[in-house]
Image (cartoon, rainbow, N blue to C red):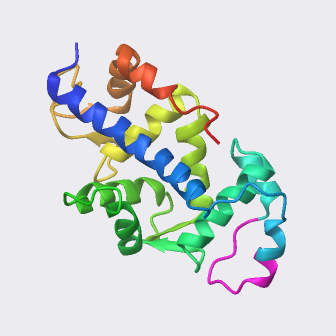
Amino acid sequence: MLTLEWESEGLQTVGIVVIIFASLKLLHLLGLIDFSEDSVEDEMEIATVRHRPEALELLEAQSKFTKKELQILYRGFKNECPSGIVNEETFKEIYSQFFPQGDSTTYAHFLFNAFDTDHNGSVSFEDFIMGLSILLRGTVQEKLNWAFNLYDINKDGYITKEKMDKNKDGVVTIDEFIESCQKDENIMRSMQLFENVI
């Protein structure tokens, strides 16, 4: 049985996922993400950016998004990040807009690190798409692996707080994490909330 502390932190993760998807919806409502048929590839050719995303066909093959969905997401990403990449400070600024009443910088730092899979200090469009693909359309195992990576703060393969520590050795392995999450109906239900959002 999970502790009340874990349930609270588990709900925090679900809340963060909700915020990510709400931000996509907000970008659409504000007109920053367009659902028109115009080709974003032309924009990629004309725009001068520091980072140029991989071909849409490659991203389509690597992610669980269609070419049209990738075009829409690219427009929104490009509007927020004209350079084509997001550094941690910019990520924190964007993220803080969703938490105007409190200081979200610490959690934004961990979230940034979860998206920055190659640990180069920036999140590219590809990084963003691969994370979003897992969160929106990944299997339960993929989503749980992503969430574990979020909580594995020092990236040593363990969560060092006393959460779901089945063998009481002071750390939670990925296997303990996944096993505990899969036994929790609320967590499993939350993993299915945002499938096919885009």
Name the residue at 25% across, 63% down. Answer: 105
Residue sitting nearer the eye, 176 or 146: 146
Placement of 12 over or under 43, stated as above or below: above
Indicate left or right for 186 with 129 as reference: left
Indicate left or right for 175 with 194 as reference: left
Q: Is residue 197 magenta?
A: no
Indicate left or right for 103 with 34 as reference: left
Q: What type of secondary structure mainly makes up the magenta span?
A: loop
Placement of 85 over or under 159, stated as above or below: below
Q: Is residue 47 magenta?
A: yes
Name the residue at 61% across, 35% down. Answer: 137
Residue sitting nearer the eye, 97 or 178: 97
Residue 189 on image: x %, y %: 45, 20
Residue interval drawn in magenta: 44-54
Which quadrant of the figure has residue 92? bottom left
Residue at the extreme bottom: 48
